[in-house]
Image (tube, helix red, strand yellow):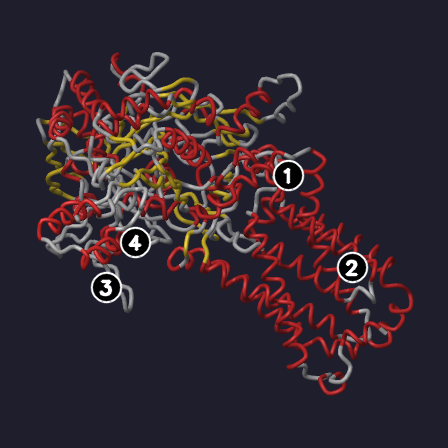
């Protein structure tokens, strides 16, 4: 079951990325990439290694976070529900089959595409700084997010109000249960890591809008859709989403700061050429 | 001058401390000070606020739905209600072991024999951890009647009725309903599902398998067995079905009757049970099962420190069953004598506890250790161990497990049921794989797509209509695939609301009765369970329910104060005021805590 779902996702996301490459990256960048890829790989290798290490650590740490959280964390489900339960109720009221299908698609496929495509697109740029910032921001999202998971123990709306969201994701498409169960624990809802990673991509896409104007528009649409989908499907509260956006903002700002400072290979040559100026040319 | 003092009332809203500071200097005469003292030195009466502890939908969907409906009803009576959701193991530990709750809503494992109420409510258990009296309830009448039904022989039915009557009057917990149990099964690889109740060990034995050594695959909606297999760990067990496959007990039960299992037979002679065991049985590690192991088990259940400390630490499970046993004497390798303080019907329940190997559990009768932490008295290794791999003597032995993914049990070839001269149901599946799949919808899908043979736990009620429609081929419903069938079974578990009577004002039976009257059980059954449950006033199986406590369209003891789930505020207010409770002008119920 899980294998089938994963294959399906791999196929769909690959197709989307190919379409994205054709639409946004273009022939010339593709040609340059073929010539320069070794150099670029060398430049992004350190941060990629850090991200890989963090992801690895994350997959192990997530097994113990719920237990750790129950030991030291603060159960915030009720305060959150008390504060904003009505909003989720209202959002659920707007449910239509079309919207459910759309947001389910976005939650699974749109989200993964949103995370994968900029890696490809930024790799196609001669300047590796956007890619390094992106990977650094992903790393920070996971690291800071994990810390927040330990401190805040919270269940999402679907656990509080199952009757409202029963027809949505997991019951309409039970196969996804197998997928998300591998990735997520039900007490890890604050903040929404789905939202924070999507918002990270959106922020960076906005920053690189002069290079990839079309992608910037798509990223904003997808980013907003992912944030709404997490609430629409009853997985996150609005507060989780707001916190996710905050986490994304902090991660992007920190990544910008850190990448400039600790760049191993390119810091000297890029000191005078800020990435923005470079991109805006 | 005294008249000029601001009054410490709601309008000015000064706190006591502020008042003291502000008036301390201004008041000169002693008479005034006395008046201030008289006004100020009174504890505030606050709005009655409480927290309902329950499970999230992933743990028990019906519990959180009930909790929210109950919250609405209690708020209608002027209370302030929070809900606290805890994961299943933490919920049980918080409620049953730490007694850290105001009220809780959840499922009770119940019991086929009403004697389970003894451990549930007898005052001698108020201080223990486990399903034994989590309410802290102590009432002499109820104690007397619980003891009387234990000792009763022919007149047990009326003794039970008297007990239930006293309990219904006191409402130490509010029994809400008995859910209907439905499971989905495949009949192409295994048949004979209806021979035994699917929550018992027999249901996994004696099946007709299409091929030898086939693996019986279940979709199990509770991840806990993949984490912990300790039969004594109350936080990880529901009814103990899986544990019963790994551990033998002297007797076994199925819908009603207790029949011999590891014991070939027993004789009853006025408080003394003489039991003979099947000879030459083995534990899964090859050690022999002896009468000494049996005697050890009862000693361990009574005190998991085995008397090594002054402070006894009874097991949090099997307390009711094993509690009737006063003494166990092993005669020889395979026969022993139990002296029991109960009539025969109740005494037989003592034979249902799992037999633990002494050579493994003896070392666990020590206080659990955690470096740098002062472990509480009574927290023994026997209670906290995850017991993986479990070593029992039961028909199936531990194979492997991956946390939150699966638990696989392998057939134990040396089990006594495989002997030619034993006519008990034996293993037909070579192994049993409990595939963890936390949601009913995906568990159903596993069965329908031939990835599982059975949903081993009852399906959540919101999917029941769908599978019943599919079975009955109702128009518009997708019919069930070939070889898939719905298995309906009676239940002896029930949903309930438990009070922590250690805390004011829950010690007041009038308050508990009034809370019970705020619950429209029939409406809850429709709203939360889609009608797939039976509202109850007595928490026992139907055949034990006396006529006076029979559900007759409304609750015979605590009729609902309202209609169609909607609390009649005026009636509720009047009823609470009648019982001595007071309301503030804003309609909030006020209590002194």
Asked which quadrant contains residue A40, the reply is: bottom right
Residue at the spot 57% in from the left edge and 48% down from the top edge: A238
Residue B535 in the figure: left or right of residue A97 = left
Tell me if mark 3 has few (under 14), some (14-19) or many (20+) residues whose alpha carbon lies within 10 angstroms of its own. Answer: few
Structural distance between the alpha carbons of marks 3 and 2? 57 Å
Q: Which residue is mark 4?
A: B384
Can see residue B291?
no
The chain carrying label 2 is A
The chain carrying label 3 is B
Depth check, mark 4 against mark 1: the one in front is 1
Residue B267 in the figure: left or right of residue B103 = left
Structural distance between the alpha carbons of marks 4 and 1? 38 Å
Image location (x, y in percent) of residue A78? 44, 46
Image location (x, y in percent) of residue B92? 33, 44
Structural distance between the alpha carbons of marks 1 and 2? 30 Å
SS for tag 4?
helix
Q: Which residue is mark 3?
A: B374
Structural distance between the alpha carbons of marks 2 and 4? 54 Å
Q: Which residue is mark 2?
A: A216
SS for tag 1?
loop
SS for tag 3?
loop
Q: Which residue is mark 1?
A: A173
Image location (x, y in percent) of residue A19? 84, 55
Asked which quadrant contains residue B372, the reply is: bottom left
């Amino acid at each position: 079951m899980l294998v089938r779902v994963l294959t399906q996702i791999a196929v769909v996301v690959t197709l989307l990325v190919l379409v994205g490459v054709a639409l946004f990256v273009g022939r010339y960048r593709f040609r340059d990439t073929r010539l320069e890829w070794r150099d670029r790989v060398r430049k992004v290798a350190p941060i990629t290694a850090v991200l890989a290490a963090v992801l690895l650590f994350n997959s192990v740490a997530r097994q113990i976070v719920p237990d750790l959280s129950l030991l030291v964390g603060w159960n915030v489900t009720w305060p959150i529900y008390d504060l904003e339960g009505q909003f989720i109720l209202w959002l659920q009221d707007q449910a239509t089959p079309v919207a459910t299908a759309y947001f389910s698609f976005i939650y699974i496929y749109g989200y993964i595409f949103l995370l994968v495509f900029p890696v490809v697109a930024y790799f196609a740029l001669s300047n590796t700084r956007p890619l390094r910032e992106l990977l650094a921001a992903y790393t920070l999202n996971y690291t800071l997010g994990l810390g927040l998971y330990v401190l805040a123990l919270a269940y999402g709306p679907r656990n509080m109000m199952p009757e409202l969201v029963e027809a949505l994701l997991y019951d309409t498409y039970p196969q996804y249960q197998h997928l998300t169960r591998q990735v997520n624990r039900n007490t890890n809802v604050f903040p929404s890591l789905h939202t924070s990673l999507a918002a990270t991509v959106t922020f960076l896409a906005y920053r690189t809008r002069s290079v990839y104007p079309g992608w910037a528009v798509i990223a904003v649409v997808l980013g907003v859709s992912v944030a709404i989908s997490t609430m629409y499907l009853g997985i996150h509260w609005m507060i989780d989403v707001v916190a996710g956006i905050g986490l994304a903002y902090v991660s992007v700002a920190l990544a910008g700061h850190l990448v400039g400072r600790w760049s191993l290979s390119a810091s000297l040559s890029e000191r005078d050429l800020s990435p923005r100026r470079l991109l805006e040319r | 001058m005294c008249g000029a003092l601001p009054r410490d009332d709601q309008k000015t809203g000064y706190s006591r401390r502020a008042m003291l500071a502000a008036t301390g200097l201004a008041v000169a005469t002693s008479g005034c000070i006395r008046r201030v003292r008289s006004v100020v030195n009174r504890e505030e009466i606050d709005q009655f606020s409480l927290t309902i502890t329950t499970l999230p939908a992933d743990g028990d969907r019906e519990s959180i739905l009930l909790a929210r409906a109950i919250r609405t009803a209690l708020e209608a009576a002027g209370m302030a209600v929070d809900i606290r959701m805890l994961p299943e193991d933490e919920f049980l530990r918080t409620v049953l072991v730490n007694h850290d709750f105001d009220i809780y809503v959840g499922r009770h494992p119940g019991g086929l024999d009403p004697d389970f109420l003894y451990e549930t409510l007898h005052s001698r258990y108020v201080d223990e951890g486990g399903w034994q009296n989590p309410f802290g309830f102590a009432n002499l009448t109820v104690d007397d009647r619980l003891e009387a039904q234990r000792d009763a022989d022919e007149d047990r039915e009326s003794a039970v009725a008297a007990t239930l009557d006293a309990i219904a009057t006191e409402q130490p917990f509010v029994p809400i309903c008995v859910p209907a149990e439905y499971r989905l099964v495949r009949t192409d690889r295994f048949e004979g599902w209806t021979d035994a109740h699917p929550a018992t060990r027999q249901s996994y034995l004696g099946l007709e398998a299409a091929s030898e050594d086939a693996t019986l695959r279940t979709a199990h909606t509770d991840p806990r067995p993949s984490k912990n297999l300790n039969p004594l760990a109350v936080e990880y067990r529901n009814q103990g079905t899986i544990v019963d496959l790994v551990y033998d007990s002297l007797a076994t039960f199925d819908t009603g009757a207790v029949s011999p299992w590891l014991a070939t037979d027993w004789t009853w002679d006025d408080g003394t049970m003489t039991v003979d065991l099947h000879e030459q049985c083995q534990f899964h590690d090859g050690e022999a099962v002896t009468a000494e192991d049996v005697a050890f088990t009862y000693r361990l259940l009574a005190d998991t420190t085995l008397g090594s400390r002054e402070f006894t630490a009874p097991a949090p499970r099997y307390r009711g069953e094993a509690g009737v046993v006063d003494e166990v004497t092993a005669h020889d390798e395979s026969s022993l004598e139990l002296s029991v303080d109960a009539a025969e019907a109740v005494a037989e329940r003592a034979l249902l506890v799992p037999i633990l190997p002494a050579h493994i559990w003896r070392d666990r009768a020590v206080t659990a250790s955690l470096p740098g932490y002062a472990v509480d008295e009574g927290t023994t290794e026997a209670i906290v161990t995850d017991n993986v791999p479990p070593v029992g003597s039961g028909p199936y032995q531990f194979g492997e497990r991956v946390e939150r993914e699966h638990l696989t049990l392998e057939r134990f070839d040396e089990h006594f049921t495989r002997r030619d001269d034993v006519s008990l149901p034996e293993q037909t599946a070579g192994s049993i794989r409990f595939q963890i799949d936390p949601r009913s919808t995906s568990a159903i899908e596993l069965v329908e797509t031939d990835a599982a043979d059975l949903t081993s736990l009852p399906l959540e009620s919101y999917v029941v209509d769908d599978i019943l429609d599919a079975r009955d081929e109702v128009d518009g419903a997708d019919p069930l695939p070939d070889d898939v069938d719905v298995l309906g079974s009676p239940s002896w578990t029930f949903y309930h609301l438990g009070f922590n009577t250690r805390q004011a004002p829950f010690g007041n039976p009038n308050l508990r009765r009034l809370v019970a009257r705020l619950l429209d059980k029939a409406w809850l059954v429709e709203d939360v369970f889609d009608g797939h449950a039976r509202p109850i006033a007595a928490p026992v199986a139907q055949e034990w329910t006396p006529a006076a406590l029979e559900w007759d369209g409304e609750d015979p003891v605590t009729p609902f104060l309202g209609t169609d789930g909607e609390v009649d505020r005026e009636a509720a207010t009047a009823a609470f005021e009648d019982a001595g409770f007071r309301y503030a002008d804003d309609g909030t119920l006020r209590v002194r805590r």
